[in-house]
Amino acid sequence: MECIPSHTRLLLLSSVICSFLLVLFSHNVRASELYFIDAHSQVDHNVKNLELIIQRMDDGGVYRTILSARSGRKPEEIASFAEAYSDRIVPAVRTKSGAYNKNHPKYYKKLRKQLDSGYFKAMAEVLMYHAQKGSKAPEVFVYSNDERVVFALGKAIEKGWPFVIHIEFQSLDGSTKQRFMTSMEKMLKAHPDHPFALNHMGQLASSEVRRLIENHNNIHFLTAHTNPGIIKHSRQPWVDIFDGEKLAPEWKKLIMQYPDRFIFALDNVWESHWRRLYLDQMGYWRKAMTDLPRDVAHAVAHGNAERLWRLPPAR
C-alpha cells in the first residue's frame, strides 16, 4: 500500500465503504434481524390466561401488539395487562359491542369512558361492513356518514390515532360494494391529513388497492388474514397475497413501490387464533419478509406502525 499514492488509497477506501453500505442497505433482510409489530389484534374471554399472548409474541418474533377487548373481555382488563407489559402491549379502545350494532346510547357512553380514562393509546377497528361469521359474529352494515362512525372518527382525530376501517368488500354485491367504496372515499377526502388503515386489505384485489393508494395519500392497508396460515382454516373470502411461501408477484411489486402504505397485522380474534394459528402465520410472514429489501421489510413489519401510532422502536 505504501507505493500507492495517498489520493488513490483514499479513493479505494471510499469505494470499499460505498460497497459495504450498498450491501448493508440494498440486500434483502435476514429473518433474525427483523421484529414485528402487530398493529391490530383482539382477545376475548375464552383466552383464560393473557400470558398466552406474550408467549406467542415471544415465539413468533412480535415485539409489540396493539390489542383490544371483545365479547366477554372488558377493556379494563386490557389496560391492566398493558400496564404489566408496557413495552409489549398497546391498549386499544374497544369499539365492538351489541350497543354499537344497535346504535344504542351505551356505545357512546362506553367509548367516552375509555377515552377519558387516559389508559388507551389506540382505537380498535370500527366496523362498517362485517359479514356474519356463523353464530360468533353478526352482520354489521354501517356507512361512513353514520353517527357511530363519525363519533369514533372524531375521537380518533382528537387523539391523533389512525382510524382503522373494517369493510369486507368481497362479501358485498356489486352495487352495494360501490356504495361502500364511494362512502369510504368521501371520508378519506374529508380528512386528507388524518391516517386511515383498511383492515384485511379490504378483501380487495391488488389493482383496487393500487387505485386507492394513487388517489388518496392517507390510506394504509393492514395485512391481517391475508396469509395461507389462516385462510386455509376459514370460509371467508379473504384475499391471499401469497404465492407459496413468498408474496405473490403483483403484491410484492405493489408493496415495494409503496412500502409506507402497508402495515403488518394479524387480527387474532378467537382463542384458536392465539393458541393454534399464530405461529403458522408468523412462519409465512417471516419467510415472506426475507424476499423484500431491508428497508421495505422493516417498514412493513414495524416501521409504519411505529410512525403512525407514535410508538418507540424495540429496545
Image (cartoon, rainbow, N blue to C red):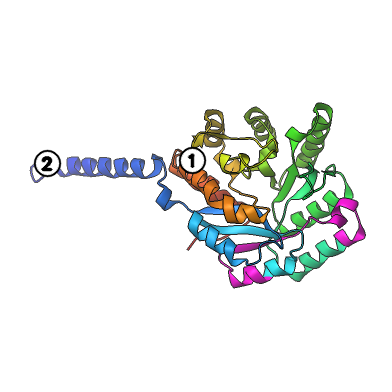
Mark 1: few/some/many CA within 10 Å (<14, 14-19, 20+): many
First along the sequence among labels 1 and 2: 2
Image coords of residue 242 (percent x, y): 55, 35
Q: Is residue 53 left or right of residue 135?
A: left
- Above or below — where is 261 with respect to 149? above
Identify the element where label 2 is drawn.
Answer: loop
Image coords of residue 290 (percent x, y): 44, 42
Using the image as rendered, state which of residue 243 and residue 112 is in the foreground: 243
Q: Is residue 98 left or right of residue 91?
A: right
Q: Is residue 307 left or right of residue 292?
A: right
Mark 2: few/some/many CA within 10 Å (<14, 14-19, 20+): few
- Above or below — where is 30 with respect to 122? above
Residue 63 highlighted magenta (yes or no): no
Identify the element where label 1 is drawn.
Answer: helix
The residue that disc 2 covers is 4
Three-letter amino acid code at disc 1? Ala
Three-letter amino acid code at disc 2? Ile
Using the image as rendered, state which of residue 6 and residue 173 is in the foreground: 173
Q: Residue at x 52, y 52 (%)?
A: 36
Total marks drawn? 2
Task: Give the residues drawn in magenta, as a range.
Answer: 80-107
Residue 178 visible (yes or no) = yes
Quadrant showing the N terminus = top left
The residue that disc 1 covers is 288
Are circles 1 and 2 on residues that touch, CB within 8 Å? no
Q: Residue at x 66, y 39 (%)?
A: 201
Residue 273: which disc?
none
Q: Nearer the viewer, mark 1 or mark 2?
A: 1
